[in-house]
Amino acid sequence: MTAPGVYRPDQPIRDAAKHGELVVFVGAGASMLCGSPDWHDFANKVVAALENAGGINFLEAEQLRGLGDSRRTLSIALALAKEQGLEIDFDNILHPARPKPIGTELYELLAGLRPVFVTTNYDKWLDEEGPEELATEVPVGSESEPIRGPTKRPKYYLREHLTSDRLAERGAVIHLHGSYTDPSSGAASTRCTFEEYSLTFCEG
């Protein structure tokens, strides 16, 4: 019986999940419920990190933030960080130390379905599965199977790995815009030449 206020997916959804026929698309709204930034705020925080590390000055940071295109802002900021050998702490930018309960509840609900996940998100919230999820697959704590802690779901974010057969791999996570663990893998890696970001800093 479902507790008051706790959402329970409709039976057709649960049946599709049970038979490995459910694909769930997860966008930025889900991660924002955990306290993660949207793409605009993410880009601005990367710029701030670059400025704090001495990679750009205040005027350059303001120009980057004013581009009006989060992907371009990210691309230029990352190009500058790479050129100067500066590391951006994406984990700290994307993931609050204590995710909000409403976001945690949502991801726990999704985890219980064990669908294929397709996401435009750059963060880690879908990438880990807990012991409760594993317990639905193996006799946890039995003599034949020791108790297991959290582990990683199969995660795909490189372009060459994004093939249609991944949609049949139950529990897999397909990151369409790449992963924060590999900044060169996706949306934040829009190609940008030195001349382009030099021009950006000279405009106006």
Image (cartoon, rainbow, N blue to C red):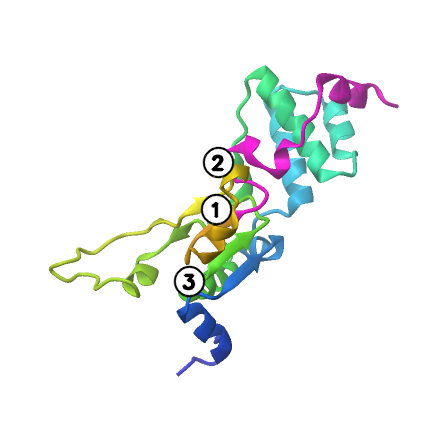
Residue marked by disc 3: 114
**Marks 3 and 2, Cα distance to the nearest angstrom?**
23 Å
Cα separation between marks 3 and 1:
16 Å
* Pointer 2 residue: 181
Residue 126 at least partly seen: no
Helix, strand or loop at label 2? It is loop
Sequence-wise, the earlier of marks 3 and 2 is: 3
Give the residue at x 54% y 54%: 118
| Residue 23 image point, x, y percent | 51, 61
| Residue 197 among magenta residues | yes
Image side of residue 75 versus residue 14, left or right: right
Q: Residue 49 occupies which quadrant of the picture? A: top right
Residue in view at x 76 percent, y 22 percent:
196
- Label 3 or label 2, whichever lies nearer to me, is 3
Q: Quadrant of the C terminus?
A: top right
The answer to which of marks 3 and 1 sits earlier in the sequence is 3
Q: Earlier in the sequence, mark 2 or mark 1?
A: 1
Residue sitting at the far bottom: 1
- Could you tell me how many numbered marks the image carries? 3
Image disc number at residue 124: 1
Above or below, comparing residue 108 to residue 36 in the picture: below
